[in-house]
Each structure stands twice: as structure tokens, then as C-alpha cells.
Image: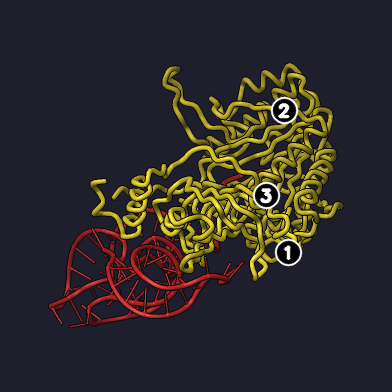
Amino acid sequence: MSQEVDLTNQLEARREKLRVLMDKGINPFGGRFVRTHDTKKIRDLYSAMTEEELEEKAVHVVTAGRLMAKRRKGKAGFADIQDFEGRIQLYVRKDNVGDETYEIFKHIDIGDFVGVEGTVFKTRMGELSIRVVKFNILSKSLRPLPDKFHGLKDVEQRYRQRYLDLIVNPEVRKTFVLRSKIVKTIRDYLDDQQYLEVETPTMQSIPGGAAARPFITHHNALNIDLYLRIAIELHLKRLIIGGFEKVYEIGRVYRNEGVDTKHNPEFTLLELYAAYDDLRDIMALTEDLIVSVTRKVLGTTQITYDGNPIDLKPGWHRIHMVDAIKEATGVDLWPEMTDEQARKLAEDNGVRVDANMSYGHVVNEFFEQKVEDTLIQPTFIFGHPIEISPLAKKDPHDQRFSDRFELYIAGGEQANAFSELNDPIDQRERFEEQMREREAGNDEAQVIDEDFLEAMEYGMPPTGGLGIGIDRLIMLLTDSPSIRDVLLFPLMKPHEEK
RNA sequence: GAGCCGCUAGCUCAGGGGUAGAGCAUCUGACUUUUAAUCAGAGGGUCGAGGGUUCAAAUCCCUCGCGGCUCACCA
């Protein structure tokens, strides 16, 4: 307490009150407090009753929460306490609680945790309240909360001190409760379909399954560098090879990339694999999964994202990537053409491409630059170029493309799926092609994983696989403009030490 | 990585060369059904950090830090 000269007047005042409480023999950081009701239970049971009915019943309740507002009027006062479920008003009268307790009530601060006992009643204004007879301080707050009316708006502080955001901005709490419900509903859905939830390593010696730069870490005892996983894919496929026919994992993956409204370095990915299925099964599953979850948590398939009305009702649009490009730009990329001809088409149509891009990469650039943003209603784009799909089966009718789809909603990718490549000879060639890309300077091209190839050589059943970025789905269903709004603790650069 | 914007009291924000402001919050006093309670009074600031220009800088200039948005990069 020698630093007290540095404290602001508000911090000093609260520490002074702490001392007063301790002088009175009250423990300002108490222990167990048994509640008979939370605020929701009180509201659910009694808000429909009239003043008279409540007076007659004289319901006794014991509840607790954080003090959020205080309106004192001489020898009586009102206060609002907040628990996880909401708020309830307290009415504290000196002649009900006694001089000593009222003195404590007078000096209690907004932010303190209190436990109260009393009877439920309604005020003249009709507000359900507790007429307090016993008042306990459960934990003292030593810092003032943000403005009761304006809340906490400073975006930086909201992310850095999420607990404050959660205390004073109720809609933030709602978003994260909804997030939890969505994830649980997805689990329930998959469990019902006999998918087995598994956990696989997040620290790997070869980071595979996606095109992304990994984080590197070091294991001291083994003296080896390890990578944080960028995808779950290759381990789940090993389990398919091992005989698990339907598996999924909902887990964190890490990509060493920039941070913006759609990217956080760590994010949550759902991946699932189903033996004997192919692209069409996975497409049907994806649609049904998202529709079921949306209906269950929102009660409707009509949503709004960023001002756009979106209808998720089943029967989503399905279109080949090349046809989608043709529709959007009039450019026909179906005819056989050389890489050079493809690049020429790109240049002629204002699509930025690198000098050495092959046909497939050009198709992808066309799609990303001209089509992606326009896909507001749910749309399955299928038939991605083989070059950008090293883990997917080839389209048997056109070897330039793969048996792959991505789902787009509100201009963003929501899912990625394919008929998994199960031919180890083809897989080796794809990896080698990736290694060539890597040597050519693409540091996100995939690294050959010999252990995975060996596993596949033992025989992998035909398999359909799916990946869904959970954070992006939560953004969509909560109409959140930034991924940071659906991550409790988004990555922030540390402040400099003063 | 580039451009633009922001950083002033615990919170929300004004102020853009001449004594640092308001509302809420805090403190003191009044008030026994209020609810953004009300009324009277008081205290509270390294104006993100550092440098420069100037008689004088929160304000103008430079560098840096953190954040936001847009773009680029990136499944």
C-alpha cells in the first residue's frame, strides 16, 4: 500500500472502503454463498404476478450478483445487481435492514459482488424487485467499472479487457453464449450421425493439410523443432485408414499470417471424414448440418449479414467454378488452353496474375478476384483446379479439375470439402508438385509427408472430407463484422512496458 | 507492407497556438417506491511516448507505440 500516492481518487476511495469493512470485522473477499434463486428464476416465476399477489405470497429469496447501479434516497435506496442471467432491482430500507447494514449499503460500490436476502415485490413503477432484509458484501471491487450508460466502446480496451466488455455490454455476452450453443449443436448433430469425435496432435513435425505458413516451436528434451498444426486433415485421414469410418475434430489450428477482420492467427476448425462417401454426400451433409444448426439456435433460416438478407433454406445453388466465372465475367475458361493463353485472358480481363502461373492458378485468380465477393446467397462452388487441391481426387471426366467444393455465403468461404485422394501414387505426385512450387518460391505450398504416404499405401477407403471454419460460421450467424467479435480473446500486440 | 483515421479524467466525448472542459462515475450534504433518480457543493489530468518549432504546444512539425478501417498479402 506504499504506492497509494499513485492511485487515482477513485481507487483510493475504494481502498479506503475496504479498510472500513475490515475494521468492522467484515471479510471483503468472502466465500461460499448459497443462492435459492438466480435473477432469471425470479423473473420467470414472479414477473407475471401482480403487486397484490406478490405481497400475499411474500416469497423469500436469496440471490447474489455484481452491483451495477445504485440510486440512494436518504434512508432507503435502490440498486441493480447483475448475474449471468440478467439483472434484478434491490430495494434497501434502513428500517428493514438496520442501521449497521444500511451504513454498509451506503458505502458499497458499483462493481462489488453482493449477496442478499429478501422478499420479492413490485414497485409502483411495476418493476420486479427484492425488498432486502439481509445484505452481505461478497467481494469488493477496487476499480470503477466503465460508464453505466455508454458502456465500454473503446475497441482496443474491449478486446484487451474482455471481462469488462462482458460485464457492461450484454450483447457481447449473448454472442459468446450463442457461439457456445452453435458448437454444442454441431457436436450433437454429428454425434447423432455416429461420427466419432477425436483429438489429434497440434504439435507436429510436418505441418500439412493446408496451404499456410506455420508457427514454429521447440521441444527442449527432444531438441527438435515442431510446428503448430495448420490443419487437422492428415491425422484424421490416418484414422480413416485405421478403420474409423466417421470421425471429426473441432479444434484450434494456427496459421502464421496477417491479422484482419477475417483472420486471427489461431482459429477453430471443424474437420470431418466419412469413409465410402464422396463429394455429393458431403455437400448434402454440409447443407443439412448448417441448416439444422441455424434452425436450432436461431429458430429460422432467414438471417441478415452486414445488411444483406440471406436465406439458408435448403436447395443451395451449385455451380462449377468455371461456369461461375463465365456467368460473372463472360470469360469462358472451359476450352483447352496453354498456361500462357490463360494468363493472357487474365490480363485482358483485369485479373492480376503472376508471371509463372499455370492454367489452374489463373482460374483460381479469376474466381477470387471476380466471383467470390458476389456470392451472397449460399452457393456451392465445385471443380477447383487440381493445382490448388493437392489432397483432392481428380475429376474423372476432366483431369484439370478436382472433386472438390467450397461453400460461399455472404461473399466468404464457409466450407471446403472434397472426395479425398486415396491413391498413394497420385498423392505422391501431388506432393512432389507442391515441393516444386515451394522451390519456386511459394512458401505456402505443402511439404511432402512420407509418413502419411506410407499410411495411404496400406490402403485408404474412398472418403469424403469437410472443413468448416467455425469462427466464420459464428460471424455469419451472429452478424458479426469482425472475427475478433466472436473470439473471446483475439490476438493483440502487447503494449510497450512503461 | 501501404494509405486514412484515432489515442484528452475511471468511462463516453468536446476543445485544434494563450490559465485543460462537459456528462456519467467519485467525495460531502439533503431526500424512505427510484430506475440514465433529483438538488447543492467539492476533488480528480504527464492531453499515448519522445524530440522539434514558438515568448507560449493537448493544439503545428518529426519519430515511435498501440488500435480501427480500407487495400495488398493470405484459403
Query: In the picture provided, is A205 more to the left or to the right than A55?
Result: left
Q: Residue at position x 46%, y 25% from top? A: A225
Mark 3 to mark 1 CA distance (whole Å): 37 Å
Residue at mark 2: A426
> Chain B takes which shade in the image?
red
N-term-proximal mark, 3 vs 2: 3
- Label 3, residues with CA under 10 Å away: few <14, some 14-19, many ≥20: some
Q: Secondary structure at mark 2?
A: helix
Mark 3 to mark 2 CA distance (whole Å): 43 Å
Question: Is label 3 on the same chain as label 1?
Answer: yes
- The correct choice, above or below, for B71 with respect to A335 in the image is below
Numbered disc 3: what chain? A
- The correct choice, above or below, for A275 with respect to B1 in the image is above
- The correct choice, above or below, for A138 with respect to A350 in the image is above
The answer to which of A322 and A64 lies nearer the viewer is A64
Colour scheme employed for the rendering of this structure: by chain
Residue A294 in the image: state x and y as whole percent.
77, 50
Mark 1 to mark 2 CA distance (whole Å): 79 Å
The answer to which of A43 and A174 lies nearer the viewer is A43
- Label 1, residues with CA under 10 Å away: few <14, some 14-19, many ≥20: few
User: What's the amino acid at mark 1?
Assistant: Glu
Q: Secondary structure at mark 3?
A: helix
Residue at mark 1: A52
Judged by depth in the image, the label closer to the viewer, 3 or 2, is 3
N-term-proximal mark, 1 vs 2: 1
Q: Specify whether residue A116 is in view.
A: yes
The yellow one among the chains is A
Q: Which mark is residue A178?
A: 3
The answer to which of A157 and A362 lies nearer the viewer is A157
